[in-house]
Image: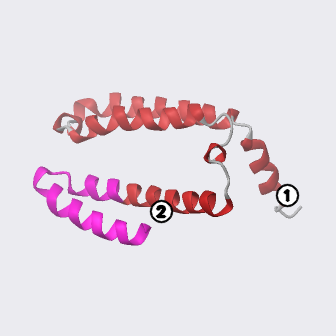
Amino acid sequence: MTAVSNAALGALAGRFAAPFGLGGLAVVSTAAFSLALGYAVVSIAYHVENRVPFTQLLPEKSGPILAAAVLSVFLFLPAVCTAAVRSSALERPASAAILLLLTVILVFAWRHPIRRRVWRWVFSRVPA
């Protein structure tokens, strides 16, 4: 699913977005969308096959991380698609906004309960 959608959507996006100067951005966006689509197909298939409720799809306390990610799409995608963002006058404000957003996501990720389990798992496999 990921490979097919990536190739098809990337070719279409590159071809039809190029006249607007968004060819590269469109191809990167379709690659991210294709990757997310592939993950969604695997997750949904797992839940359907094993009859696991979809409420278990996201771990507990994942709402703030998901909200920050969705908010970033609505805040930054329209800004990136405008020609004004490409001006050098907006480089610093855009960089500051992205840094702020990443900080918010990292704070929520650090406070997430699954972080401890992941760290324990990683360090249990590191040779002493």
51 falls in the magenta region = no
Q: Quadrant of the C terminus?
A: bottom right
Residue that badge 2 annotates: 38
Mark 2 and mark 1 in contact? Answer it, CB < 8 Å. Answer: no
Name the mark on residue 124. 1
| Magenta stretch, residue numbers | 1-30
Q: Residue at x 60, y 59 (%)?
A: 48
| Mark whose residue sits in front, 2 or 1 | 2
User: Badge 1, how many Cα within 10 Å: few under 14, some, many 20+?
Assistant: few
Main SS class of the magenta portion in the image: helix
Horizontal side of 70 relative to 119 (left or right) equals left
Q: Residue at x 49, y 33 (%)?
A: 68
Which amino acid type corresponds to the residue marked 1 in the rendered image?
Ser
Comparing 77 with 12, the one in front is 12
Q: Is residue 84 above or below residue 29?
A: above
Q: Residue at x 57, y 31 (%)?
A: 64
Horizontal side of 11 relative to 104 (left or right) equals left
Comparing 82 with 71, the one in front is 71
Image coordinates of residue 126 in percent, x first then y, are: 82, 61
